[in-house]
């Protein structure tokens, strides 16, 4: 059973990445097209702008109509399945990893006492609630007021990050914030963008003039998706970096990185539109923001209490045997773990020393290992390992 789940994880993760690339690629491309539109060199009825480009040895001319052409072409390409498949594969991954493996990845007794069923309900409920609140915000008077809308949306997503990091395991909380953003983006396509386009096509098929407001509403949601892309991409890779989700104020760190991602996307949007004047500060500010976050999250090692006697490796090995080997061994015994995560094993003394920096970062500094602290590592045991490392991590 575990072997089959591992293969399902692999297959759906692969699908998620492939379709995600396709979705993000088309999103970036069409937003770039909109920003690059210039008045047509030869005026044409109904055409609001055009873009000339060269790629792969060919020349291309793309025209955009103010509302729609006078006559619909026989073939009309739609871009939707990339979004739907990315979201669906992501939801399957969420269930496979975090809901079926809830004891390992979803709940953490050190964070809260929430039970597995409640944790799953919180996770799923947060996706639906976030979309509803976002959708209502878009339909409010703030919907077309960019800065106030962005400020309220930032506060809303930050509140979700704070709440989820207070209830779920840190990695699970980060992934659920990413799932919230991904759900908003996919729901924009499913509930607003595609229906708006369908109504415009239906109007033309029926011989009526399409409503230009439909196109504006779809374009606005598409622009929102464009700005949300970089934050959600960060969250997709964040579980490889425990200094982010393991940080004491992890929700605030996530909010800060989200702002940096939005700033970066805004710079390139402005550049595509040719509005470079006054925007040169954005990328340096984003870079300084990353440096500041790195400095803030740099662990400050507390003085290690010295014992009467140096810590023996035998004592450390006993802690590793009881708390770490259930997962990190040649033959894991922890339910849900079939092979040592990332190939990290602690069966032999030299393997423990080989990964001493990883042990220091994840066990001593961020407390992100063992996963969900399922094996019950105590603070005294973490202090013992910290003392051994401070004393030089001497092997027998």
Image (tube, rainbow, N blue to C red):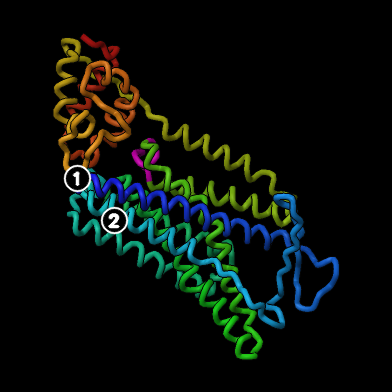
Q: Position of residue 126 (x, y in %)?
A: 33, 62
Mark yes or no: residue 335 visible: yes
- Choose top left, top right, bottom left or bottom right for residue 319: top left
Residue found at x 42% / y 47%: 236
19 vs 122, left or right, is right
As rendered, which of 251 and 49 lies closer to the eye? Answer: 49
22 vs 50, left or right, is left
Q: Residue furthest right?
A: 42
Residue found at x 21% / y 29%: 329
Q: Tell me the residue that label 1 is attached to.
A: 109
Residue found at x 44% / y 34%: 296
Q: Earlier in the sequence, mark 1 or mark 2?
A: 2
Mark yes or no: residue 140 visible: no
Indicate whether residue 80 is drawn in magenta.
Answer: no
Q: Tell me the residue that label 2 is attached to.
A: 95
Mark 2: secondary structure: helix
Q: Position of residue 237 (x, y in %)?
A: 42, 43
């Amino acid at each position: 059973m575990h072997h089959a789940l591992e293969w399902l994880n692999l297959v759906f993760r692969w699908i998620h990445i492939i379709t995600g690339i396709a979705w993000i690629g088309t999103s970036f491309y069409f937003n770039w097209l909109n920003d690059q539109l210039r008045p047509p060199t030869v005026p044409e009825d109904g055409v609001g702008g055009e873009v000339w480009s060269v790629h792969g040895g060919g020349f291309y001319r793309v025209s955009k109509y103010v509302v729609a052409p006078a006559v619909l072409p026989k073939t009309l390409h739609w871009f939707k399945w990339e979004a739907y498949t990315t979201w669906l594969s992501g939801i399957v991954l969420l269930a496979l990893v975090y809901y079926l493996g809830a004891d390992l990845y979803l709940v953490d007794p050190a964070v809260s006492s929430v039970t597995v069923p409640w944790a799953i309900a919180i996770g799923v409920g947060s996706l639906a609630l976030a979309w509803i609140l976002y959708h209502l915000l878009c339909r409010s008077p703030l919907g077309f007021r960019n800065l106030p809308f962005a400020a309220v949306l930032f506060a809303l997503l930050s509140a979700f990050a704070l709440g989820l990091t207070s209830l779920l395991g840190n990695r699970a909380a980060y992934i659920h914030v990413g799932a919230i953003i991904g759900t908003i983006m996919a729901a924009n396509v499913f509930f607003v963008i595609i229906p708006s386009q369908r109504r415009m096509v239906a109007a033309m098929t029926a011989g009526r003039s399409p409503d230009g407001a439909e196109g504006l509403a779809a374009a606005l949601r598409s622009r929102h998706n464009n700005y949300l892309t970089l934050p959600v991409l960060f969250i997709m890779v964040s579980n490889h970096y425990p200094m982010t989700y393991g940080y004491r104020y992890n929700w605030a760190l996530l909010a800060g990185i989200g702002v940096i991602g939005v700033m970066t996307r805004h710079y390139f949007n402005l550049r595509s539109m040719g509005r470079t004047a006054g925007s040169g500060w954005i990328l340096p500010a984003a870079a300084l923001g990353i440096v500041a976050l790195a400095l803030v999250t740099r662990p400050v090692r507390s003085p290690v209490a010295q014992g009467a006697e140096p810590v023996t490796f035998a004592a450390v090995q006993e802690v590793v045997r009881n708390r770490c080997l259930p997962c990190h061994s040649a033959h894991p015994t922890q339910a849900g773990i079939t092979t040592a995560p990332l190939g990290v094993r602690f069966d032999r003394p030299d393997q423990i020393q080989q990964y001493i920096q990883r042990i220091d970062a994840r066990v001593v500094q961020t407390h992100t290992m063992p996963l969900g602290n399922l094996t019950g590592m105590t603070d005294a045991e973490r202090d013992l390992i910290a003392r051994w490392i401070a004393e030089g991590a001497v092997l027998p």
